[in-house]
Image (cartoon, rainbow, N blue to C red):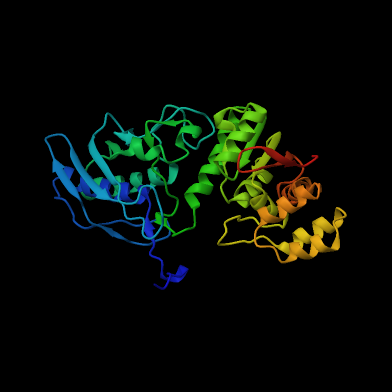
Amino acid sequence: MKEKNAKELRYGWTTGACATAATKAALTAFFDGGFPDPVMITLPKGQTPAFALATEEKGTDFARVSIIKDAGDDPDVTHLARIIVTVRKSDGGIVFRAGAGVGMVTKEGLPIAVGEAAINPVPRKMMREVTCEVAAAFGQPADIEIEIGVENGEELARHTMNGRLGIIGGLSILGTTGIVVPYSCASWIASIHRGIDVARAASEPHLAASTGSTSEKAVADLYGLPEFALLDMGDFAGGVLKYIRTHPVPWLTFAGGFGKITKLAQGCMDLHSGRSSVDFTFLADQLAGLGAGAELVAETRDANTAMQVFEWAQRAQLPLADRVANKARAIAVGIAGDETRIDVLIFDRAGALVGRSDG
């Protein structure tokens, strides 16, 4: 079967866009205008998508609508999640509440204050705007409580970084454009940035950005780091480094396997296997610089995997992993700047430390 290319991938809608559409539909019914289905909203960049209602309900003092989120072709944990909005009269102004499955903010450093529902600024703005729009259309004051819930949200949140960010009890309502771009991983990178913000607000002196769970556990054990100091970087080295440049921390450790750190040492900012690859000529040059024999250098140029080269270097008692770690550190400092102390650690698949920079 032919694989879809990026131009064929279907875009989707953020939880914030779904919540805004549900708010508009519920509020229209609350003011006796019936449930518009589909309901159309305007996104921050002017697009006007329409959303089908999944459920609708009206009582004497509330109206409730749910919309099933469509994340398009993005592998989003909230794809097909039910976003539920209930509107009621408030004691004054527009008030946001966390319903079942939406988390509460418990740590400083996020764009929402501690004690507030984890509904980000742009979705709040979108919902305020539709609330004012609908209220004005019916000649009513915009004194409305908006409660947002996500079906099974607490369970879905276990597959996100919310716990580390201090968002407890469920998911966040996210979105800056209202649109989910397939495989952009924007929400992952945003979570990395919020993790840095939370650590900075807590004056945590040492953060670790890891490419996977093995290196994360190893670096946490090595330095005794608290969970909120651990950044689940995945493949997004650039997402960490570019943000650290303008939001420095005292000390940042990069931790990962030999192959991923080799790609960082080459200057790759996206370490995913589909978007960058190990340059075996680069590794051959590093071995030559360590005094490797001509045969090993030649074999390295034709190697199949980075791990194969690492094992050859170990047998030859050449500190290739240390050299790669130092090269990676130089790349990292060049992007992040010198306000943050940076070191790089390389772990094997069992979590043993096999290479480190001298920075």
Can residue 196 be seen in this snapshot?
Answer: no
Reply above or below: 147 against 8. Answer: above
- Residue at 55% over, 62% down: 274
Q: Quadrant of residue 254?
A: top right
Quarter of the rendering occupied by the N terminus: bottom left
Camera-side residue: 255 or 153? 255
User: Which x, y percent locates residue 108?
Assistant: 52, 29
Quick check: 137 left or right of 9? left
Camera-side residue: 63 or 179? 179
Can residue 278 be seen in this snapshot?
Answer: yes
Reply above or below: 48 against 349. Answer: below
Quick check: 137 left or right of 228? left
Quick check: 298 left or right of 192? right
User: Which x, y percent locates residue 201?
Assistant: 59, 30
User: Which x, y percent locates residue 80?
Assistant: 30, 51
Q: Quadrant of residue 8?
A: bottom left
Quarter of the rendering occupied by the C terminus: top right
Reply above or below: 131 against 303. Answer: above
- Residue at 37% over, 31% down: 169
Q: Residue furthest left?
A: 60
- Residue at 18% over, 54% down: 36
Q: Quadrant of residue 247?
A: top right
- Residue at 54% over, 33% down: 109
